[in-house]
Image (cartoon, rainbow, N blue to C red):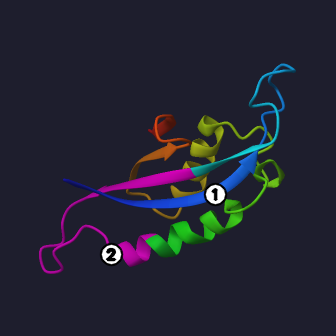
Amino acid sequence: MMLVFKEFSFDAAHYLPHLPDGHKCRGLHGHTYRLKVFVAGEMNDSLGWVLDFAELKKIILPLIDLVDHKLINEVEGLDNPTCEVLTRWFWNKIKPVLPQLHKIELYETLTSGAVYSE
């Protein structure tokens, strides 16, 4: 089995409404997110790849468009958009159309993020 990945980025604003007053993340702020999508599968020997990255882009870019340069609290299912909630949101959108999805890594900052897999 081979594991391949493609990385995407987007900028978005959010606030975390369930945090106590005074917590810096309760107020409106933004991040440049990096999303890494990992796909597992057998390599097609005649094509020399597991998956056409162009096909992966067709699945992921419409989802990126939903959150890029948006207040993501306003996106359905993201009223409390922690990094963990956002990672699981992406997973639930991608997995039904890409069964070979293996894991997702979402970086909220250069040093912080979440990983989701089953």
> Farthest left residue?
45
Question: x and y percent of residue 29 in the render?
Answer: 75, 43
Relative to residue 38, is residue 6 depicted above or below? below
Question: x and y percent of residue 95 in the render?
Answer: 51, 55
Relative to residue 17, is residue 43 depicted above or below? below
Question: What residue is rendered at 57% in x and 44% in y?
Answer: 87
> Farthest right residue?
21
Question: x and y percent of residue 28 in the render?
Answer: 81, 41
Q: Write down the residue under mark 1.
A: 11
Region in magenta = 33-56
Asked which secondary structure carries label 2, the reply is loop
Question: x and y percent of residue 3 in the render?
Answer: 26, 54
Question: What residue is rendered at 84% in x and 32% in y?
Answer: 17
Question: What residue is rendered at 78% in x and 34% in y?
Answer: 16
* 1 and 2 marks in contact (CB < 8 Å): no
Question: What residue is rendered at 13% in x and 80% in y?
Answer: 46
Left or right: residue 24 compared with residue 45: right
Left or right: residue 45 compared with residue 36: left
Q: Write down the residue under mark 2.
A: 52
Front label number (1 vs 2): 1
- Amino acid type at image mark 2: Asp
Q: Is residue 48 magenta?
A: yes
User: Dot 2 surroundings within 10 Å: few (below 14), some, or many (20 or more)?
Assistant: few
Q: Nearer the viewer, residue 71 or 3?
A: 71
Q: Nearer the viewer, residue 6 or 77?
A: 6
Left or right: residue 115 compared with residue 27: left
- Amino acid type at image mark 1: Asp
Estimate the spatial distance between the alpha carbons at disc 1 and disc 2, rounded to whole Å: 25 Å
Left or right: residue 112 compared with residue 42: right
User: Dot 1 surroundings within 10 Å: few (below 14), some, or many (20 or more)?
Assistant: some
Asked which secondary structure carries label 1, the reply is strand
Q: Is residue 18 magenta?
A: no
